[in-house]
């Protein structure tokens, strides 16, 4: 299954789990409780309510924050981020495979955000190659120390396996200077190939 990647935003704004300040800027914020219930927690086949809610969401400045909030907090009922509960169902099913390097960077900056399994693994591998202690990783990810040690151990195995694979490739074929330089950059940050960009690499180094 393909990872959900969102690594093309130059200056992302990632909010902490406890930060609800975005809600005050939502177009639905000033609506009555009755209207909100009718439009955003509508009956399954109430097309008129769905269409009107989608029209409001389509103009809302915090549409993405609303969508992320529903995913991070496992809110499956109602309309959030302009999507009905049926439309969000595939996103909820794949949320632990989401790989958003803006969120990875935010974790290194000390923000308390909800990381997917893939994002947590990316943080752990980068922390390992930067020489972090298990205690520092436990503090960053808010984990039990023993769990952090296990994650670091797994990261060490993964990096060793990857390096062994790359060494085998170097023995069988020559690599031009440009490719070798790209490999050096990738090796320094330990992130999956499909999401490597110069901006993200520089941002991760700065954050760490």
Image (spheres, helix red, strand yellow):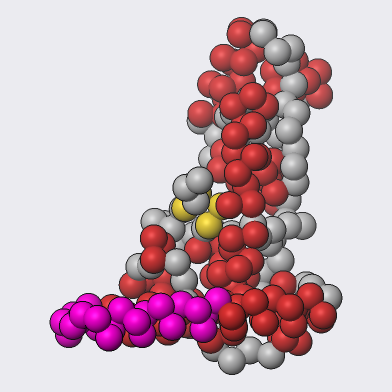
Q: Is residue 97 above or below residue 144?
A: above
Q: Which residue is drawn at 41% across and 78% down?
A: 165
- Which residue shows up at 77% across the image and 57% down it? 18
Magenta residue check for 151: no
Residue at (51, 30) in percent of width and height: 59
Residue 173 image position (x, y, % from top left):
21, 80
138 sits to left or right of 56: right
Magenta residues (range)? 158-181
Return the residue nearer the eye: 100 or 179: 179
Of 113 and 181, the residue lying toward us = 181
Q: Is 163 included in the stretch rendered in magenta? A: yes
- Give the prevailing secondary structure in the magenta stretch: helix
The percent position of residue 119, horizontal first and vertical second, equals 59, 63
Q: Which residue is drawn at 75% across and 42% down?
A: 74
Q: Position of residue 56 (x, y in %)?
A: 57, 25
Residue 100 in percent (x, y) is at: 52, 58
């Amino acid at each position: 299954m393909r990872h959900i990647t969102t690594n093309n935003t130059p200056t992302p704004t990632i909010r902490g789990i406890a930060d609800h300040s975005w809600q005050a800027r939502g177009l639905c914020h000033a609506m009555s409780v009755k209207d909100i219930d009718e439009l955003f927690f509508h009956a399954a086949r109430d097309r008129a309510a769905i269409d009107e809610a989608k029209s409001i969401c389509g103009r809302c400045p915090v549409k993405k924050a609303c969508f992320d909030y529903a995913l991070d907090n496992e809110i499956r009922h109602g309309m959030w981020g302009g999507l009905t509960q049926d439309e969000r169902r595939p996103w909820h099913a794949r949320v632990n495979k989401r790989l958003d390097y803006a969120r990875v960077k935010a974790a290194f900056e000390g923000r308390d955000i909800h990381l997917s399994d893939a994002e947590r693994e990316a943080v752990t591998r980068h922390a390992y190659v930067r020489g972090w202690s298990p205690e520092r990783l436990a503090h960053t990810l808010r984990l039990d120390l023993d769990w952090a040690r296990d994650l670091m151990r797994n990261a060490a195995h993964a990096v060793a396996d990857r390096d062994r694979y790359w060494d085998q490739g170097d023995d069988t074929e020559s690599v031009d200077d440009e490719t070798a330089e790209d490999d050096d950059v990738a090796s320094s940050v330990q992130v999956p190939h499909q999401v490597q960009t110069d901006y993200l690499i520089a941002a991760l180094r700065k954050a760490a």
